[in-house]
Amino acid sequence: MKGFIFTNFLDFVEKNNGLKMVDSMISDCDLSSDGIYSAFLSYEYKELVTLLTYVSKNTNIKQEVLLEEFGRFVLPYLIGKHSYIVKKYSNPIDLLAGIENHIHIEVKKLYEDAELPTFSVAEKTKTSLSLIYTSSRGLTYFAIGLMKETLDFFKVKGKIDIDHAYNNNGSVKFHVEILD
């Protein structure tokens, strides 16, 4: 997992819980990196799970909620670093539909060793989108946070639901709907 996720997670924890929590988390967790991250290097996914578990236990906030909030926190960073990609889109449905065939291609140019989830478009209209999300890491709620923040970025109201009836080898089906 790319280091920018870890550096942003530390920033997320600091913003929401203070530097003392970050210091405690790093010293209390058994991390092979010792909690020292570079945005451009890769680290074991299990370290993120360890950090997330620590924050969840110490704040009594469910991991799913933390992941969604973290996804919302990370999107402005991604847009700031890669605004040239986002500028090609005039609405959130098209941007979300373009994750796999445009955005992830651009990400791979920058980080060829990045292990990305896949987002397959199942259905698309002007105001709705169904996406199949497949990831070995299962960061479903992180993805939801990114998508919710995408709606906010485009200043539209919408909702994102998980189709709990969909079950295909661990993939998740999202329904995104614009309500404006």
Image (spheres, rainbow, N blue to C red):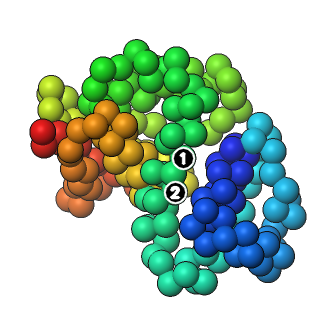
Vertical relation: 147 (above or below) 32: above
Q: Tell which of 96 and 130 is nearer to you.
A: 96
Q: Which residue is the site of mark 1?
A: 74
Q: Name the residue at 29% across, 48% down.
A: 173
Task: Answer left or right for 138 relative to 28.
Answer: left
How far apart in space, not on screen, are marks 1 and 2 (Cα)? Answer: 6 Å
Would residue 145 appear left or right of 36 to someone viewing this image? left
Residue at the (30%, 20%) spot, across then down? 90
Residue 77, percent from left and from top: 57, 39
- Tell me the kind of residue under disc 2: Phe
Viewer can see residue 49? no
Picture coordinates of residue 23, whole percent (x, y): 79, 72
The residue lying at 71 percent from left, 51 percent from top is: 7
Residue 11: image quadrant is bottom right
Whether 151 is drawn above or below 145: the answer is above
Q: In which image quadrant can residue 2 be found?
A: top right
**Is residue 15 shown above or below 151?**
below
* Amino acid at pointer 1: Val
Within 10 Å of the Cα at label 1, are there few (<14), some (14-19), or many (20+) other Cα atoms? Answer: many
| Marks 1 and 2 close (CB-CB < 8 Å) | yes
Identify residue for label 2. Answer: 70
Q: Mark 1: which secondary structure?
A: helix
Residue drawn at point x = 56 percent, y = 31 percent:
80
Q: In the picture, which quadrant includes the C terminus? A: top left
For disc 2, the neighbor class at 10 Å (few under 14, some 14 to 19, many from 20) is many
Q: Nearer the viewer, residue 173 or 176?
A: 176
